[in-house]
Amino acid sequence: AAAQRFLADHYDTYANKTEPNERTLCGHIDLSPRGSKPWQPEYGIAGAVQNKAADATMIKEMAFTAALGHACGIDFKSADHLKNHPEFAWEKEILRDMPSRPWTRFQAERP
């Protein structure tokens, strides 16, 4: 559970405030007026959207938890993003929503 909270963190240590952006572990480049230069422009459609966590007990059991989308639960909605940032309109035909999914446990089966 601690690792899941860690991956969902929105604390910007540079600005000393809680704000989801490119400098937080949850990785919301799409919400950042700075982008992530030189890789992503301002409000670039990128960020951390595949999350995996495990503790020592889970590893021993060949198990882990995973969550698709932002670990914090904020959904990426393509129509909203394109409305607010029309400079990405060229992506409209391929851009999809990225809803956040709940943490789910996976475990290897024993033969």
Image: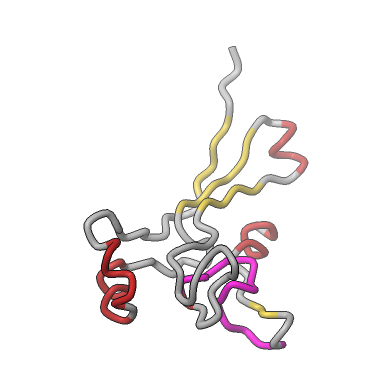
Q: Which of 34 and 73 is in front in this view?
A: 34
Query: Looking at the image, which residue sits at the far front?
Result: 38
Magenta: main secondary structure: loop
Is residue 86 rendered to the left or right of residue 18? Answer: left
Residue at (69, 39) in percent of width and height: 58
Query: Looking at the image, which residue sits at the far right?
Result: 56
The percent coordinates of residue 65 (x first, y second) are 58, 45
Residue at (50, 46) in percent of width and height: 104
The picture quadrant where one finds residue 11 is bottom right
The percent coordinates of residue 99 (x first, y second) are 36, 60
Q: Which of 32 and 72 is in front in this view?
A: 32
Quick check: is 54 in the magenta stretch? no
How many numbered marks, from 0 up? 0
Residue at (31, 60) in percent of width and height: 97
The picture quadrant where one finds residue 75 is bottom left
Q: Name the image quarter holding the C terminus.
A: top right
Residue at (25, 70) in percent of width and height: 79
The percent coordinates of residue 32 (x first, y second) are 51, 78
Q: Name the image quarter holding the N terminus.
A: bottom right
Q: Which of 19 and 63 is in front in this view?
A: 19
Magenta residues (range): 16-30
Q: Is residue 24 above or below residue 101?
A: below
Query: Looking at the image, which residue sits at the far top?
Result: 111
The picture quadrant where one finds residue 85 is bottom left
User: How is the protein colored in the picture?
Assistant: secondary structure
Quick check: is 24 in the magenta stretch? yes
